[in-house]
Amino acid sequence: MRKITLRHLRVRVVAGGTTLGSDWAFEDGLNIIWAENTQGKSSVFNAILFALGLEILLGRKGELAMKPSLRAELEMGVPEETVPVAESWVELEIENSHGRPVLIKRYIRSDSHDDRLVVVRQGTRIAENHSVLEENFFLHDRGAAQREAGFHTFLANFAGWDLPRVSTFQGSSVPLYIECLFPLFFIEQVRGWTGIQATMPTRFGIRDVAKQATEFVLGLDVSEISRRRRELHERKAMLRSQWDGVLSSFNERVAQSPAFASLPRSPMVDFALQVPRLLVLSDGESYDVVEWLAAQRERINVIQGSATAEKSRAPSFDSIKLRLEANEERLFIEESRLSALRNELRRTESLHKTMRESIHSLEVDLQKNEDAQKLRKLGANIGSKVALGVCPTCAQEIRDVLLDQNLDVPPMTIDENVKFIKNQKELASAFLEIQQKEHEMNRVSTGAQAQVVDTLRALVREDRAALAKPSGRPDVTAIREMLALERQVARIEEVASGFDLAVNRLLDLADKWTSLLAEERTLPADIFSAEDKKKLARLERDFRSMLQEFEFKSTPIGEVGISRDSYRPSAREFELVFDSSASDNIRVLWAYTLALLSISTKHMTQHVGIACFDEPGQQQVSKASRHAFYLAASRLDPRTSQVLVTTSEEKEDLVRELSGVRHQFIDNGPGRVLKPVRP
Amino acid sequence: MEAAHLFDLNFTFKSRPIPVSPELRPMWMIAKLSLALHLACRGGRASVLKLHLLHWATATDGNLSKLISLRDGAPELIRFSIRPDPFVTRAVAFACADSFFEQYRLGSVQLSYRGHLFAGVLSENNQLLAEERERLRNIGKSISESTIKQAFRGR
């Protein structure tokens, strides 16, 4: 079913007090729109695109996409003089698959209307001119001040397109804009004939845009599968970062304490079976946190007991002095130990940083080398001998470098280079893993040691104070020790409950991870559905038979097919367009564009139902081929296809080429396209 | 372990290939120069000297800003002069032999049909040579012959 049908195009220009313009009415099936050479070239084609807000396919935005005679100044009158354009606009009447008409108006030159605004009147035709509501839509700019909705959103709804979301190179996701579909339907005069989808806009930064557009237009199921795959990939990435979040907030809590636990750095499916224990480092030994806490509480009880039993009898001056000296010596040792550990920690940290940086630069290098591989493949596809390692002049083998070809030490090939860097990267990553573990242990030991030093310092401070005020001071050292222990216990208990929270969160995430992986496994590899295969086979058949009718010669038809990877014409592994001579290129575009349209009559696709050809190469292709082209276009079912061809061929030749071809001939007369009309 | 006895051992050296910067691959340079002709040269043609200049200017952001300053007639503080790069010379030779470029006049080349196709494909694939393409678009078709002469002569 046709998604959009073009019914009527109207162009008006107000200049020098007169209104000039032209009208074209389109029918189903084949429409041949003729204009005398140099007078009307591309006017109709460009005006239709402009009305639909698709002038980006012409390489320009807004009114600049239109010829100066439509927006700046034109020659008119007798005698001819140059007159400035006061106002100009385009009106286009279209229908959708339900037969609902809509009138679109867009100003080219106007003092009152922005060229980004499109005025839409639904339910009326140009001939009827019912008074209906005028709705304003905007194009291109989505400013915060805009209250109007987007015209292309309206157009997509009107046509019944549910545009998929696709990813960009920046990592964001955008809809597959309509502008990306139309290069398959509209073949523009200047650049359109240089290749399939030659006028594809690249400004949206959409990954793989040409392939995605063709996949959508053909209505292939495989794109749904790839979409789900991409979606799963994003959900996995999000889960990984949530996991990472739990880990880093736990690590923050546990820093500066002698506790540690080796939680897995990335989501694990069987995490529930391998939950690690929280450990405490004390005197160089690791203890399970539960055991450790029990032991500390025991010590606290003991101290409490002995303190109350002895009724805090103050020890003698001498015993305090002895104890102080012993502790001071111990403190000195422990402090230097701590200092050494801190230095070590700083060292491993900076080593860590260096290693991350070198892994990053390896990744950049790898990416560049992989790009170089792609460039070589592109070059080979286009017929380059250098890309294949062969001298184009003498056919000798050449090294794939711009260095001296006769260097003693042979350079690596790109493939060897890529392998080399990958190896280096693996090595560096493995090394980094080991280094990270070492760093982690250092951190924990440093934390534990810091605790030891703090406790000792407190004891030393207390004993010094006791010596300074000798009489009547109870021995609070024991109590101080107990308090320190209680603080530690409280701290570690906090860490332990944080740990439990983290583990619960991770168990939950591990569960989700398992189901994501299971979902991923249910996805078939990117194979086409049965319907997909039928569509592509038919596309190939129709394409081939048309190529033959059009007298395509560059490659034996038997070797021509439709690539199942790019959906473009190919011969052996090369994309067909690059191999062909210029006139055969044109034949390929004719056949491909018409074939896409033809399979839409027999299969469910998202094709718009229109194909427009602007000046289909009259200089380069033979008359017989052109006749075959018109014949093929006319044979498409007019209920589901509409073909527009704008041409300025010699009328005599054209008439002959159209003999036996069912078509509508639209000729607005000789001379200028814009003629005086009633306003 | 005695170090002295190491001198008596027979060492054999095996020649292994050396890694090479991807920018020294012919296809890379031809691609870059094709893009340069397409995006920054009128009619897809230019003097080979201009290609040297564009190669240098699109290598880093620093170089790019130096070229822009020179083009815009910045104060005398900008002093630099560049030399022709032998790798560019070789790549141009390859490109001509391989039908990407055609000799236009003495010392100038232009994109051939194949070169235009190549440049077209490269303009489409946003990942490849993205930085260089960005910088070329920045330069546009605005570099004059006098700017080129100044760049090579030094100010």
Image (cartoon, coloured by chain):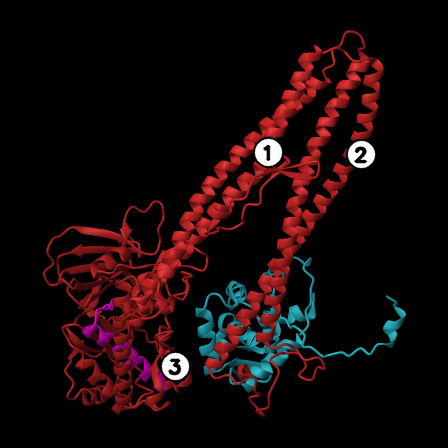
Cβ atoms at labels 3 and 1 below 8 Å apart: no
Prevalent SS, magenta region: helix
Nearer the camera: disc 3 or disc 1: 1
Residue B110 is situated, as x and y percent measured from the top left of the image, at: 52, 80
Using the image, tell me which numbered label, if any, was put on residue A557.
none
Instruction: Let me know if residue A607 is in the magenta part.
Output: yes
- In depth, the one of A195 and B10 nearer the eye is B10
Above or below A644: residue A348: above
Q: Which mark is residue A291?
A: 1
- Residue A7 in percent (x, y) is at 16, 68
Q: What residue did someone put label 2 on?
A: A333
Q: Chain of mark 1?
A: A
Residue A532, percent from left and from top:
28, 72
Helix, strand, or loop for circle 1?
A: helix
Residue type, mark 3 in image? Val
Q: Residue at x 24, y 84 (%)?
A: A629
Would residue A363 be visible to someone looking at this image? yes
Cα distance in 3D space between marks 2 and 3: 79 Å
Residues shaded magenta: A583-608
Instruction: Check disc 2 and give the amino acid type.
Output: Ile
Residue on which the image places disc 3: A577
* Residue for point 37% across, 90% down: A554
